[in-house]
Amino acid sequence: MSALFNCGLCCMILSSWATVQLVIMGVLLKIEALSLLGDVEAETYTDYDDFIKQTKNNYSMVAINCWIAAAIYLLMIVISYLCIIKARRNERNKARKLEDDELFCEDKSKVI
């Protein structure tokens, strides 16, 4: 197989894993999982209520960012799939040219 096929397959596998991971992280952030508090806690706050408000806002913003990144990786999966299709088409065209007897059996003396 060609490098285009291998690159497309590798990118598709990595993008699939990234999409799954980011969607799961987005869901966990949306439900405000306590284990992810260290990633979203407010750094500057005046009192407890301000801390809670900013932290909830940060949870929501980071969840949306995860889903946006997952959508970008979905686009990469589509691009990788198109690369795989293109590589297969190129391989089929090469095979057809090798099987074409007319290409090798032409009278070369008549060709200028």
Image: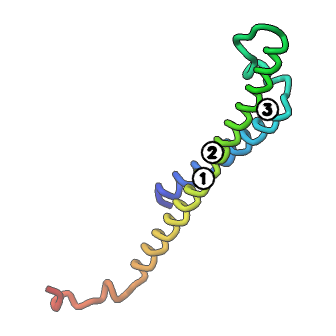
Q: Residue at x 81, y 35 (%)?
A: 30
Amino acid type of the residue tagged 3 in the rendering: Leu
Q: Position of residue 80 (x, y in %)?
A: 56, 55
Identify the element where label 2 is drawn: helix
Q: Position of residue 12 (x, y in %)?
A: 61, 51
Tell which circle, 3 or 2, labels the residue nearer the N-terminal end. Answer: 2
Q: Residues within 10 Å of mark 2 (few under 14, many from 20)?
A: few
Residue 51's place in the image compared with 65, above or below, is above
Distance in Å between CA atoms under marks 3 and 1: 23 Å
Residue designated by label 2 = 14
Residue designated by label 1 = 75
Q: In which quarter of the image is residue 29?
A: top right
Amino acid type of the residue tagged 1 in the rendering: Leu
Residue designated by label 3 = 29
Report the quarter where the C terminus lies. Answer: bottom left
* Horizontal side, residue 4 vs residue 58: left or right: left
Distance in Å between CA atoms under marks 1 and 2: 13 Å
Amino acid type of the residue tagged 2 in the rendering: Leu
Q: Where is residue 26 in the image (x, y as percent from the top left)?
A: 76, 37
Identify the element where label 1 is drawn: helix
